[in-house]
Image (tube, coloured by chain):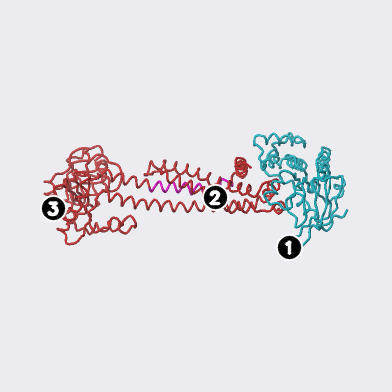
Chain colours: A red, B cyan
Amino acid sequence: MQLKQLIRVATKSLAVNRSRSFLTALGVIIGVASVILLVSVGSGLKDFITGQMQDMGSNLIMIVPGDIDIEGAGAGGEAASGAFSSITASKLKLSDAVEIERSLPQIKDTAAMVMAPGLASYKSETFTGQVIGTTQNYINIRSSEFESGSFFTESEVNSGRKVAVLGYTIAEELFGKQNPIGEKIKVGDYRYLVMGVMKEQGGQGSLTSDDKIFVPITTAQRQFGMDNVSLIFTEVSSSDEVASTIPLLEEVMLRRHEEEDFTVIDQKEILSTVSSILDTLTIALGGIAAISLLVGGIGIMNIMLVSVTERTREIGLRKALGATPEVILTQFLIEAVFLSVGGGIIGILLGSGGALLLNNFIPMTVTAWSIILAFAVSAGVGIIFGIAPARRASLLSPIEALRYE
Amino acid sequence: MTETKNILKLESVSKIYQMDGVSVKALDNVTLAIMRGEFVSIIGPSGSGKSTLMHIVGCLDTPTSGKVLLDGQEVSQMTERQLAQVRNKKIGFVFQQFNLLPRTSALENVSLPLLYNGTPSSEIPKKAAEVLGKVGLGDRLDHHPNQLSGGQQQRVAIARALITDPSIILADEPTGNLDSKSGVEVMEIFKKLHEQGRTIILVTHDDDIANQAQRTIRLKDGKVIN
């Protein structure tokens, strides 16, 4: 019997039980769609975050508090969470930044940062944003464009003046159409003179300036009662100099600190750490979804076993009319594979369609490998879970099968 | 009488079943011959071994001992795969229960044996329509079994048996599930097929049916008694 005819027989018997075939395939449809959706969420997140980080520039070196094993962070979450908790116990000083800039001429710019959440208000309007206390060079490193006004200068940092530069969203929320320059906003107990508004950047979290209030670091330290800084940024003139500058930075820092209570990392390292964490996340999400694909496969086996029992007479008849055991085996295997592959294709369409649709709200990236993998796994599921029922069908004795009521 | 005249020949065929450790002799040293073009009925009460005989003649089962020659071919030692091919080519089955595939048209039901012998798929519908026409169902090609009467369903089954142009038509109680009028119609078809030169073996427990054949073979306790 030709394969073409076998395929026709198999599709015919699936079509005869249309609703049952669909419900059986539904398990695989949901499994494949959720694998693709969840993997898209994971890789979308990764693309988004790494994309934003790359925008920061590749000639950036950061000094963060605490002795972090950055290489190990990808493998487990422990080192990464250590990085977050150590920010509160930072031993970095503003003077470290000054010293770095003074002793390492190859460093183009250095900026120190402190951060605190703050409720900003202007007249009756309020907005909760992030207060970033930093130095004048911050704007050179994170080159941002201005909607109006300008960033504060060295003299304003040195004298600890109460001036602020607003992110785009904050300015819009507090002032609407009104020009904020020269107005005073209130953050906590302090009143800040607005001297600049940044252009809209888009995005979320620590990587956008939209919801930030930039103030001189000295003012912020005074207001929030801090004597340390959370982060020091430095920028070298080209990315080739990054590798050679890191040990020099470590040397300067070690000279000033008795122990290694800081970590010097470059953007490439952060990027690879972040992407390895997000890869792990993607695999975990995909793995969870894969369980539902497995359940879908078991559903196929279950229905195929029921189907073999229910169609015992049919199998007996086909054998009496000349179907060999191999032909029966192939027919039932094709039915199982069609259910799973058909379900897989529908699942791929639903999953990628859904991902493209959701991409309007959250970053999603449909990856080719997740589609290929989902398709291959669903076909494999059909073969693996189809074999047992198909074998059972092929081994039925035609006499017993014809007698079966 | 030469060998070639015999379409079927059984030589000392025995079939022994093992049931719960007890040997049951379903067929006991059966020897018989059926000639090409003959219309033979096999009759016997239940437990006489006629089902077993039918299974062996229909190549659905192999004997414990003895030889079965079907159209000159020794089939008693064949593998399941070979038997399937012999059934497809040489035997046309007609069952008491009709055994049509539900939710499948008469045309497709009749086509079924051709799916298993490599007939090009383009020729199948034409052939199936042709044999359905021969059993008087040329206007019922697309009807499903549940849209057909019992007699019509059995005629579809006969068409299915005829489509491979088999050496033997093997009918197992073909009128057992039919009212008497349809039963008569079906028997008329068998007689007509016999007149056209077909070999027909009809298994029954009903004397009236059996007597309509040319010759009757009586079975009792696994032995031929006439």
Q: Mark 1 to mark 2: distance in Å?
A: 37 Å
Q: Nearer the viewer, mark 3 or mark 1?
A: 1
> What is the chain identity of the residue bearing mark 3?
A
In the image, residue A73 lies at what x, y percent?
31, 56
Q: Are marks 3 and 2 on the same chain?
A: yes
Identified at 68% across, 52% down, the residue is B79
Q: Mark 3 to mark 2: distance in Å?
A: 67 Å
In the image, residue B137 lies at what x, y percent?
75, 36
Q: Nearer the viewer, mark 3 or mark 2?
A: 2
Q: Which residue bears the numbered disc 3?
A: A99
In the image, residue B25 lies at what x, y percent?
78, 60
Q: Are marks 1 and 2 on the same chain?
A: no
Q: Is residue B222 inside the magenta stretch?
A: no
**Amino acid type indicated by mark 3:** Glu
- Please state which of residues B105 and B168 is positioned toward the viewer in this rendering: B168
Provide the residue span drawn in magenta.
A20-42
In the image, residue B223 lies at what x, y percent?
83, 57
- Please state which of residues A326 and B213 is positioned toward the viewer in this rendering: A326
Q: Is residue A39 inside the magenta stretch?
A: yes
**Amino acid type indicated by mark 2:** Ile
**Amino acid type indicated by mark 1:** Met
Q: Which residue bears the numbered disc 1?
A: B19
Q: Which residue bears the numbered disc 2?
A: A383
